[in-house]
Image (cartoon, rainbow, N blue to C red):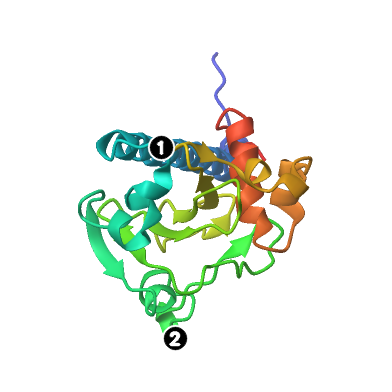
Amino acid sequence: MKKGFTLSELLMALTIVGVIATLTVPVLMNNVHNKTFANQVKNMSATIEQLAQDQLITHRTRDLSDTDFGDPEKLLSDDHFSIAKKCTSDESLTKCWKTTATGKDKVTYKMLNRAVYTGFPQSQVTIILKNGVIISYGISSSPNALGAFIMDINGNDKPNIAGRDLFVFHVNNKGHVVGYNVVDAMNKNLEQLNQCCKNSTDIAARCCYDALADNGWKMDY
């Protein structure tokens, strides 16, 4: 005579499976999202660098400041990007980033240590691409970089966290995308990953780009 499982045994097995799923599915989904974010950052970084190299050729120069990268208004235009929305420097934080918007429209960005991120540039032109990416660009004060980009790869959608979907990176006069440690000689020996995860200033978004690039575009932090 063959014996089957009793109802109580089946219920217990289903309960165990449910508990395991509850614990593992969020982790798996988070890993999938992080991999997607990392690939998008990598692709956008490569797109910016290719655009910079093309500009050097088009303008027949070795100095990127002699190209459209020397003028944020010209760079963030339909000539170079597929734009869904463009915000002037005066309305950038209100209508594109929405960090100074009011009510339900307001968006709050945070860092990996849960502190509020406040490193958004003041008075910079911002664009939202048709694929949802938000980009601001401004001329850098660093002698080792021409300009700095701040980018959210999935727009105002969550998680809105520096190091997840928000990153800052630079482009130098030779048309190469560079990280924070290359830009700032004073911080050349910073532990990028430590700063990315624990810093409570806008350095976090800069060091997270370095940490991600240096880790082979794997967001396993």
Residue 185 against residue 106 in the figure, above or below = above
Secondary structure at numbered mark 2: loop
In the image, taking residue 54 as reference, residue 105 lies left or right, namely right
Residue at image point 77% right, 42% down? 191
For the image shown, how many numbered marks are present on the structure?
2
Is residue 23 among what the camera can see? no
Q: Amino acid at mark 2?
A: Thr
The extreme bottom residue here reads: 103
Residue at image point 77% right, 44% down? 190
Which of 218 and 1 lies nearest the eye of the viewer?
A: 218
Between the residue at mark 1 and the residue at mark 2, the CA separation in whole angstroms equals 35 Å
Q: Which residue is mark 1?
A: 49
Q: Which mark is residue 102?
A: 2
Is residue 85 among what the camera can see? yes
The image position of residue 20, as x and y in percent, is 62, 39
Residue at image point 69% right, 67% down? 115
The image position of residue 9, as x and y in percent, is 62, 35
Q: Quadrant of residue 8?
A: top right
In the image, taking residue 210 as reference, residue 125 lies left or right, namely left
Name the quarter where the C terminus is drawn.
top right
Residue 153 against residue 122 in the figure, above or below = above
Q: Quadrant of residue 27?
A: top right
